[in-house]
Structures are given as structure tokens and as C-alpha cells.
Image: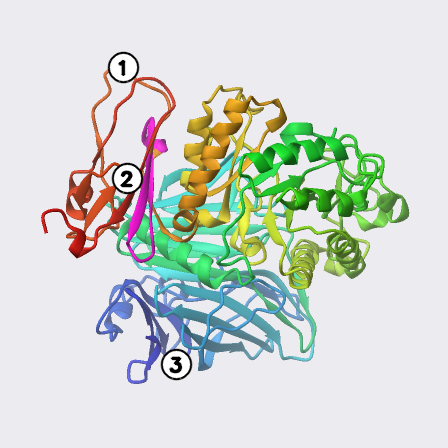
Amino acid sequence: MGVCFLEKENLFHLCGGDVSYILKIYRDAFPMHLYWGKRLSDPAISWYLEAPYRRKKLLEGAEPDDPMFLHEYWPFEYPGYGLSDYRPAAFEVVGQDGCCACELRYRGYEIIDGSVELPGLPSVWAREDQAQTLKLLLSDELLGLQVELYYTVFEHSGAITRHTVFRNQGGGKLKLKKALSMSLDMKHAPAKMIQLSGTALREHWIEQRELGIGETYLESTRGISSHQQNPFFALVEHQTTETGGDAYGVSLVYSGNFLAGVSCDMYRSARVQIGIHPTNFGWQLDAGEQFCTPQAVLCYSPKGLNGMSEKFHDLFCNQLYRGRWKDRPRPIVLNTWEAFYFGLDHQRVLELAGRAAKAGIEMLVLDDGWFGHRNDDTSSLGDWFENKEKLPRGLKGLAGEINALGLQFGLWVEPEMVSPDSELYRSHPDWCIHINGRKRSQWRHQLCLDLSRTEVQDYLIDSLSRVLSGANIAYVKWDCNRRISEPGSDGLPPERQDELLHRYVLGLYRVLETLTSRFPEVLFENCASGGARMDAGMMYYFPQTWVSDNSDAVCRLRIQYGTSLCYPPVMTTAHISASPNHQVLRQTPLDFRAAVAYPFNLGYELNLCAMSDGELQQIAEQTALYKQLRPLVQQGKFYRLLSPFAGNQTAWMTVSQDGSEFAVWYYKDFCQPEEAYINVRLTGLEQTARYQDEDGSCYTGEMLMNLGLPLRWKNGDYFSQMWHFKRLQEEALPGR
């Protein structure tokens, strides 16, 4: 397990689970990538490095004593800019002479038990007995630049995390223009790249692209990770399926601008990279200063996309979020937005809470409109004090009465924004992100606060602390409804303006770290107009995310299916809203809406006061069923079975960690005439074990995985079916 150094080969073998990652120090100077894939029993593969690259060249190489060594043809672990490698660089640094060239040479290594912390940044973590970390020390003596490459390999899964630290050990100033988290060169490019793309209300749709010669990248320059592209991708072969074949997954633990993807050269070698987007990025390193990149996460599986997803899910659930809600049941919430919009008041909220208690709901969340003088979306962001006209007894009084009904109380906030019509903006107009002399573009009548400034961070910490300590608040929904434009800050000098966007993210992380540490009992939920900032960086602080503002069940099948490629269901919120909803105006039955939400974190966003007693009883039955299933769906292993991107049918399942029970969900959105009959083939079961459904039907794991489950076929749209199986003990087998 862990990191092994083969001195004779000058080679490092990182191994864990079923994975090997091998790199070599070539000519005692250059870290070269050899292999990342299925675990090798013999890692001595130096021959694999040199054989393909010693071709006869028309031009001499860069090293006089090795004329065949041309940087462009070799598989570097972390390539720089400005030498004879013309592929995309992992970093660029400007020296005191204004030139941009750097050649890092190997100086030594260190093996550390466990993981290392990233200063000011979230990261996947591990105890000393769970992982080992390799630290490679590199330097460019001419620049006075020291670079540390960190690799942490996890024993159980073989997942690997990477990040890079730059240190200015010279006497002058250096300027980073590009600093990616990781780069590696694969000798043979995989066939396809899979990414999660979309837009608001259509997040995380699965897109597949063939990898050809040239660059295949995804990115965000919006100041956040974005609806449009997610900081995750997978590389697969043509024969890779959900359950078989090679799948290489890469994710970034970061919530700002990013660049990710693959560059294939003329020999179909692939350079794989991810990190902070270099557009409008810079970082000045004075003598003695350092810069740390965000963390990249690499998960390989020889068992297809489901195998890769299982590793991401396990890692994020157990090694990313560290708060008290890590293993706690997530409550069933009712959000007030669709019930009242901005028109809430004490009595109406209390009436809604009474109906929620009767329906078995566990928490009421007060959404937008409770603060300042906010009656629409044109005012009051930044003024985090209760509106006494709407809430004469304040949040404390309202929370107390809701608690008396047996419900917990939660609150919606949007702290990173400010309304021009607010006390905060009138007092501090310079606290928003802006460029002096240019217009201040608004979206939803709001501007972005400049979280690169310590005084702004302190204001948010202090004002939100007063709110959270002033009432019994058990939950916070943290929203973020616009993107950054006109990136400029009155708090930075001209030569550091290109540091703003990264400093914003660092400032946000400081605020989140402080508040979640100060209020550890509060369940924080991440939201950004839905899934605009659903990334591993936010999950470090918030154990669940509002994955989309689109709550239509048919749309959610694709959104939730795509999200599960990287992010675990327990970190995904799935709410049932009124039908028709605002996004598609589709009439969807309540039972179908519930069935789509069950395998995730169930919640509601509708007006229970406008529903009949029969509908309320239906919701009570749904919440009772979910409470039975909750330990399974929030702690189990999630498997995708049928893709909504392939047709009108979707299926997935959840298996408990010990394999003693599992649940399967099948959905058909729109009926087609004379459809082919199918069985739903399962996965992740024991071949010889016997499983019993709630109706008494028994099957072996072998039957279920090879023959599949028969459907109780029903014509019509919006058909769903659920099975809940438990494994029979040997003594309980029929006929014994």
C-alpha cells in the first residue's frame, strides 16, 4: 500500500486498491509519467518510457549529451512553458527579466503518512493509516523557484489526489500566469471524454466527445464552477460500459474558474490537465512567498463508469466533508418558496408548518423575503436582519413556535450578493466587485460583494453569526444567484488585479470555514441558482447541494443521473414541487415526482395549505416510506442501470454497505406504442445469495444480474416501480 520508491529504477509506485500510478525520474532530473491504471504486481517498467520516444528525429534535441531528448515527445508529470515542449503547459512563470521560461529539475522526495493540508483551501483528507503522500521537490535555480508536487494515494480505493505548491526562494519577484493542479501524459489517448454540461434548469447532462488530434477542454470563466460546465470529466474507451472497461475520472476541489480536459498530439499521446483557469489569472510571488493550487482528484476503475463513480462517492462521503452531519440522517424539509414567494408572514408560515407536521415532514425552511425590506428581488440583499413587519415576533419567536409543532427551523440566505437598494450598499458602495469608470452590471438587481477583502468577509461572518445565534436555526440554504462581471477590486493594487477571482474564492472559503466551525450543529446546504456551484470544493463545507432549480420529475431523471457520475446521492437534494412547475409547465403525478426523489435527499417545495386532505395523506405516506428507506439511500452504494439519455426508461439501485438489502427504482416517462418488453438487470449483488422482495418473491443474485427483474407493465405516461429486497439468511431459505 501507498508509495514505494524503487531506487534501482529511480521510479515511484503509488498503489492502493486495484490501482497503480507509476512515475520515473528520468536522467535524475525530470519526473516522467509511465502508467495509471489497473494495479501491476511488478512496477519495474522503465522500458515502457523510453522505447516509443527514441525515434530518429530530423532535429537534434534539447540536451547536447542526449540528442534524442526533445521535450515535446516525452511524458512529463508537470510540464512548464518556454522550452522545447510546445504542448499546453501546466504552469507559466515570469521571471525578473520579464521572460517566461522555466525548467524544473528534480531535487529529492519525501514520503508522508496520511494527507497534507492545503492552506486556505478545501481538500480530501486522510488519516495516517488511510493513505500515503509522495512529495516531489523540484526547482529552477535561475529563477529561484521551488515547486513541490504532492500525490496522495488512498489505500482502500486507489484514488489519488494531486496539488502543487510554488515557492519563491530567490531575492526578487516572480509572477505566476498559469498554475494548474495536475498534469499527466498518457502514451495512448483514451477514445472519449465524458463531461457534465448544460445550463440553468438543465444541469449535468452527460456529453460524450471523441478525442481527436488537438485540444478538448471544458471551462468556466464566470467566477464560479458554473451550470454550463462542471469541474469533472471522465476518459473512457469505446468498449467501456457502466459495469466494465477502463474509466479514468478527474475532479477539481475548487469552486471558481477552472480549465480541464485533454490535448492529443500528432502521435495520439494525451496530456490530461485540470486546475484554475489561466484567463485573467495571475499571482505575484514576492521573495519567500508561496502559492498553493487547488486539489485534483483522480479515480480509475477497471469496472466501468459505475466502478469509477463508486470510488468518487466513497471518497467524497468519507474523506471530504468532515462536519457533524457526515453520518447523520438528512431531514425531510419543506421550503416555503413556492407556497408564498416573497409574500410570507408569521401566521401564514405557522399555518404551513402545522400542515407539514401532519404530513411527517421534519423541517420547515423559510426562504427569500424574511429580511430587510424585501418584498421582491430588487432590494435588501446584504441587510441580514429580520423584517419586523412580516415577522413581528422575529425569527426567534417564529422558530420557537415551529419547534413546538415538532419541526426544526431553517433559513435561506444569499450572502455573497448585495442589492443597490440596501443599507449595506449605501454605506459601502465600494464593497462590490467593480471597475472604476465602468458600469456595474446587475443581474436580478444585484451585485457581487468583493470577498477578496477581509473587511467584507468579516461583515458576513459577523452579520450571519448574529442571525444564527439569535434563533434556533438548524439549517441554512446558501444561495448564489449571479456570476462575476467587471472583475475589479478597490482593495487590490493594479499589479494584483488578476488575483481577484482566486482571492474571491479564498475569501468565500474563509467565511464558510468560520461559520461551519462556529455553528457545527447547523446543516448547511449549497445552492447557486440550482447547480451552478456543485463541486467538491463546496462539499467540503456543505454536506448537500441543491442540484437544480428544475424540480420537474422527468427533467430530474437526466439531471440526477448525470450528477451521480461524480457526486453521491446523499449530497444531492431532490425536492418535490407543485405541478405544473415553472420550468416546463408539465402535469406530473405526485407519486411519480416522489419516486424520482426517493433515492436522494427528499424534500418538498409546494403549498400544503392549498392541497386536499387526500393529497396531504399521500405525502404522509411518502415521508413514512422515505424514513424507512433513508438509511439505505443515504449510506448505500448507488448503481446506474438504465440511462434516460438512451431512451424513455431510467433505472438505478442502491445497495447497503454490507449487502443485506437493496432497493431498485424503474421509471418510464412517456409511453410509446408496442414497446419492447425488458427486464431490469441489476448489479453489485452476491451471485449465490438469495434475496426476497416485500411481496415474498425470492431470487438469487445470479438471476437478478443475468435475467433481471420483471416489470409490472402498465400503459401510460409517468410509470414508476420500486422493489425493496433483503438478503435471506442461510437458515431462512425456503425448504430448509
The reply to whether discs 2 and 1 touch (Cβ–Cβ < 8 Å) is no
Q: How crowded is mark 1: few (under 14 residues within 10 Å), some or many (20 or more)?
A: few
Does residue 254 appear anywhere in the picture? no
Q: Looking at the picture, how far across and down is residue 591, in whole percent?
A: 43, 28
Which residue is at the far right?
427
- Residue 28 has which mark? 3
> In terms of depth relative to the viewer, which is nearer, 134 or 167?
134
Q: Which of marks 1 and 3 is nearer the N terminus?
A: 3
Q: How far apart are marks 1 and 3 (CA)?
A: 68 Å
Q: Looking at the picture, how far across and down is residue 234, in whole percent?
A: 38, 49
Say which residue label 2 marks.
694
Does residue 558 appear anywhere in the picture? yes
Q: How crowded is mark 2: few (under 14 residues within 10 Å), some or many (20 or more)?
A: few
Location of the N terminus by quadrant is bottom left
Give the image quarter of residue 671: top left
Q: Measured along the vertical axis of the image, is residue 35 above or below residue 619? A: below
Residue at the image position 73 percent from the left and 60 percent from the top: 496
Q: Measured along the vertical axis of the image, is residue 699 above or below residue 314? A: above
Helix, strand or loop at label 2? It is loop
